[in-house]
Amino acid sequence: MHQAAQIEIRRATAEDAQAIAGVLYLAFVEFRPLYTEGGFAATVLDAEQVLSRMKEGPIWLLLRGETPVGTVAAVIKEESVYVRGMAVISSARGSGAGSKLLREVENWSAEQGYARLFLSTTPFLHAAIRLYEKSGFRRTGDGLHDLAGTPLFTMEKIVSK
């Protein structure tokens, strides 16, 4: 597959905020009917919200050639790294893009000295859940919680420092 060779991941800058907002929208719009209005709005950020997140922790942008096709963000929470804003547009799914994004966060976490990563996802994002499980994430016993009425559960992964 030639497309995989063209994939590049880099740390996002303020100039990438609109592109990241676009990736989030394109990645989640097909699932919009499954979200509450508030849950969708909290998942699909606008450029200003992306800029705010950049102040909390790194965001990465995955490009295929010049086209933004994926993103992920990380923020340190207590003794762990919270993986959030993980998104891959539909045309790039199955290309290894999601795995590359997760590895980028894992590498950054290890460099920062954190061994535990965690994330929240919705029960209806089946392909994302399979990706997380394949990457070593397991559901925690925390049970369901919600994002503005959209159900969520937590997954975690312990990596070596």
Image (tube, rainbow, N blue to C red):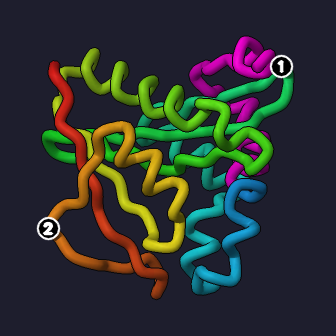
150 left or right, relative to 113: right
Secondary structure mostly seen in the magenta stretch: helix
Q: Nearer the viewer, residue 104 or 81?
A: 104
Residue range highlighted in magenta: 1-24
- Front one among 125 and 41: 125
Residue nearer the viewer, 68 or 77:
68
Tell me the residue at 48%/81% (across/down).
150
Q: Residue at point 37% right, 60% down?
A: 120
Q: Is residue 36 above or below residue 115?
A: below
Mark 1 Cα shell of 10 Å, populated few (<14), some (14-19), many (≥20): few
Judging by the rendered image, the residue that carries numbered circle 1 is 65
Quadrant placement of the C terminus? top left
Residue shown at 26% from the left, 41% from the top = 117
Residue 8 lies within the magenta run? yes
Amino acid type at circle 2 is Gly
Q: Is residue 47 left or right of residue 79?
A: right
Quote the CA–CA distance across marks 2 and 1.
40 Å
Residue 85 to residue 92: above or below: below
Of helix, strand and loop, which one carries label 2?
loop
